[in-house]
Amino acid sequence: MDKRVLQERMRKKQQQLRRRKMMKLGGYILAVVLVAVFIIKGVILPITNKISGKDADKPVRVEADAGKTADAEKTEPKKEEVKTDGTAAIRMPLASVSHITTASDLTSGWHKDENGKWYQNTDGTYYAGGMQEIDGQTYSFDDNGYIQTGWVSQGFDDLYFNEDGTYNPEKHKPRIALTFDDGPGEYTDQLLDCLEKNNAHATFFMLGQNVGSWESTVKRMTDIGCELGNHSWDHPEATLQGISDEAVIEEFQKTDEALMKACGQKSTVARAPYGAAAQREFDLVQKPFFMWSLDTLDWKTLNVESTVDAVMNGDLTDGSIILMHDIHEPSVQAALQIIPQLVEKGYKLMTVSELAAAKGVKLQNASYADFWDSSLSKGLVAGYDGPLLSAEAASGSEGGEGSVSDGSSEDSYDEGSDMSDGSSEDGSGEEYSDESGDASYDDEYYGDGSDEEYY
């Protein structure tokens, strides 16, 4: 045989052998891949999903065990209701009836067992983790689906539910507003920690010149629901009444600009330095101005015990506004005691705007010293359009709620007057006091203009 022919045959034979080896190797690789896929999908994933409580192929199905039939098993499971409102209850499919009642009792409507009262819908779901209106009444359900009674916190709100579980809108905790002036400062974050921990809000009347150094603190105020108040840029010693219109506007505009830079929000309310302001200032600044009903004098005493005593043994009438300062360490240390003590005693701590809304007051460019029922009943609070209390109820309402009269009142509030803050008619600032007669603004508070003598 020709040598070249023999070599060509041998070359072709080797090529065939190489092809067979490659095909065989490819078959092995394909088999390994298929086995790996089978193991991962058929063994590993089911085990993993079983551990994590998930199903790789389909969403989790939670079905009621009561009265299950073959047809029922073929139907699609009920999906959970999307919870868009933070206080709304979720429709939960019945996973098991063993912890609630017997299968024979699972009809739509109210049910009761040793753990409490719960409600089943016609579609086999029950409510849990929020509030729901049923037959014209509002109920609160815990995470296990049972109704709640007594005081229930829903977000920031504290709501009262009667023994039968129905919401009672007429009942509320005594509400007061803590306010802090002249900050923010190095102690303000401690105060925010305490407020957040106790589900409490406060209003901070800030000096614009301080905001730039504590922008993250200001941002946190808004994050936890506190209110931004404007206390002027640099607390002018001459008071707002002693400077020009342009200067007054600049004091508050510059502060709002600093607040916008810090957190993207302007102040919603204002407080004049030393509390000295009248209708001119209200109109220039175009914000509600706030005085106070309880002055702790914390700036003067700089003493923790006396500040705590001033609040806890002071007039805590529903609707009170309390004055403190967060630039002084003793004041903040006192507040760290006052806040949890007030909450424990059943008080609800709100911002001044929240307090106004709770009292039915639409804030105006006017002055506010308190939201007591007695002040509302006398027509002393601008923007109040609710029912007025009778004279008898008003005289006894400062310790709590009073009865409601027919709404008549001989005393009316003139928006152009300063009746609500008790300032002198000439606006001179010689003496600026609240309705109770306690001096809120007096020459003795001027001093040398240092922080210790600021309001």
Image (cartoon, rainbow, N blue to C red):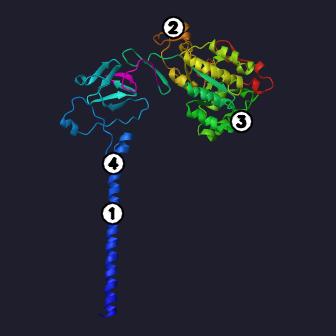
* Type of amino acid at the residue the image marks with label 4: Val
The residue where tag 2 is placed is: 393
Q: Which stretch appears magenta?
A: 134-153
Real-space Cα separation, disc 2 to disc 4, in angstroms: 75 Å
User: Which mark, by number, is residue 209?
Assistant: 3
User: Which mark, by number, is residue 43?
Assistant: 4
- The image quadrant where one finds the N terminus is bottom left
Real-space Cα separation, disc 1 to disc 4, in angstroms: 19 Å
Horizontal and vertical percent position of residue 448: 81, 25
Disc 1 is placed on an element classified as helix
- The image quadrant where one finds the C terminus is top right
Real-space Cα separation, disc 1 to disc 3, in angstroms: 73 Å
The residue where tag 1 is placed is: 30
Give the mark nearest the N terminus, 1 or 4.
1
Asked whether disc 2 touches disc 3, contact meaning CB atoms under 8 Å apart, the reply is no
Disc 3 is placed on an element classified as helix
Given this view, does label 2 or label 1 mark the residue nearer the observer?
A: 1
